Image: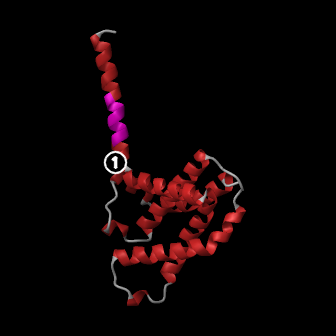
Amino acid sequence: MDQLGAHVITHQFQSLVDTVIRCGTEFSAFIVIAALVMAFAFYFGHDRLLPLIAALFMAITLSKAFPFSSMLPVNPYTQVGLYAGFVVIGLIAFSGLSYFMASGSIGFVKTGILSVLTAGLIIAIAIHFLSIENIYAFSAPTKALFASNQAFFWWLIAPLAGLFFLGR
């Protein structure tokens, strides 16, 4: 191969590597949360994703209706802590829902897809419901994917659709 051909291939490969690295840094929060949800699913079992998703939805309602919020300090850490506490309580309360998931392994790919959808739900809730922007500044591409009200609706629906199609 001549030098010109090698230069073109090297340039294209470098461009691909730069694009992958840029996407990794711009969506790092999403990637980390998806990896944590996937680790949760593999450690506790894929059948625990249904109670996790139910707990995420329940915690929204309980956090909004919490009657003692006026007694708590007003800062984003308190809001996130209260929400996380309700998620843990909901996870324990909904642990019986795991029996409705199909028994046996659903596979690495299906668990990965459900983990990504759940991570999207978590970030959408954090952006729209919690004051997470005061704690962590999301990149512009992440905001574009999660910040609109229409995107929030679709991220609320996505894990439910994923459970319907992949959780059997």
Q: Is residue 91 left or right of residue 98?
A: left
Residue 102 location in percent, x, y?
A: 71, 56
* Residue 136 vertical placement versus 114 (above, below): below
Residue 146 location in percent, x, y?
A: 44, 58
Residue holding disc 1? 25
Q: Quadrant of residue 71?
A: bottom left
Q: Quadrant of residue 44?
A: bottom right
Range of magenta residues: 14-21
The furthest residue to the top? 2
* Residue 109 vertical placement versus 71 (above, below): above
Residue at x-position 44% and y-position 78%:
82
The furthest residue to the front? 43
Q: Is residue 35 visible?
A: yes
Q: Is residue 67 left or right of residue 139?
A: right
Residue at x-position 61% and y-position 75%:
93
Indicate the quadrant containing the C terminus: top left, top right, bottom left or bottom right: bottom right
Residue 19: say if magenta.
Answer: yes
Residue at x-position 31% and y-position 29%:
14
For the stretch drawn in magenta, the main secondary structure is helix
